[in-house]
Image: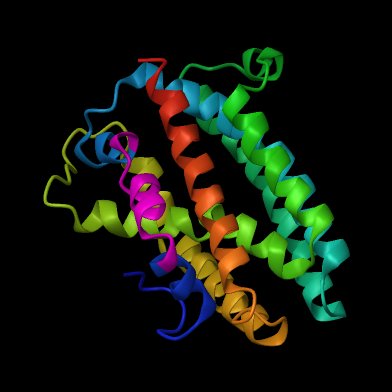
Amino acid sequence: MSGFGRADGLYRRLCAASAAPWHAYTWHPFVQGLADGTLPPAAFRRYLVQDYLFLVQFCRAFALAAYKAESFPAFRAKIEAVSGLLHETTMHLGYCAEWGIPEAAILAEPEAAETVAYTRWVLDRGIAGDILDLEVALAPCTIGYGEIARLIEASPTRNRDANAYESWIAMYAGTEYQALAAGAADRLDALGESHGGAARLPALSADFAKAAQLEADFWQMGLRAA
């Protein structure tokens, strides 16, 4: 069970309702390879390139969330999140360079089918629905990476010695990202209360499960490059 959100809140209810796809995503073989350091470098490089293209589209999704925001403070927070994501794209390019992937190669790479499927689905949910629909579609990414870092740190197979993925793990297990994930879960719980989450649980759970499945597909896309 998640450590984020309230025990009776929407976020944990969504996790419980989508237990199988949630586990398939958060403890995917790709994640297990990160934890024990056995993930083939080619798989990680493929993931890194597509993750940059993914972030570009998620900037659009967060901009849409600002437009759909339920209040001016929420609007302002989402605009700040967009700014943070834009900064993250620049940092991501630097991280890719450390793995021997030049910016020109990333920008020349077409989006994988899995990248398109996931990001466009999120945007479609945001356009068709309200702010709660969009936040539920975003949650497996924004909160899920915090959950994954916790699972990695708690894993009995966790390898900290000569693990090429240590800096990636540290970023998501660190205080800053853990606070971001906790805040996103709290926000989802609050939106669940203000936007009728209990009455909408079946539809929201289906969307949450779909997002988790698309996240797992994204990991699998990386593994196929190994």
Overall secondary structure of the magenta stretch?
helix
Look at the image and name its color scheme.
rainbow
Looking at the image, residue 144 lies above or below residue 110: below
Q: Residue at x 19, y 43 (%)?
A: 160
Q: Which residues are magenta?
A: 17-30
Q: For residue 1, say whether it is visible.
A: yes
Looking at the image, residue 21 lies above or below residue 216: below
Instruction: Please identify the quarter of the rendering in which residue 223 is found.
Output: top left
Residue 137, given in percent of the width and then of the height, sits at 63, 56
Instruction: Please identify the quarter of the rendering in which residue 219 is found.
Output: top left
Q: Quadrant of the N terminus?
A: bottom left
In this rendering, position of residue 205 left or right of residue 27: right
Residue 19, given in percent of the width and then of the height, sits at 36, 60
Residue 144, given in percent of the width and then of the height, sits at 46, 56
Residue 15, given in percent of the width and then of the height, sits at 43, 65
In this rendering, position of residue 42 left or right of residue 82: left
Q: Nearer the viewer, residue 44 or 165?
A: 44
Q: Is residue 20 magenta?
A: yes
Q: Residue at x 48, y 16 (%)?
A: 100
Q: Residue furthest left?
A: 156
Q: Is residue 42 magenta?
A: no
Q: Residue at x 16, y 38 (%)?
A: 161
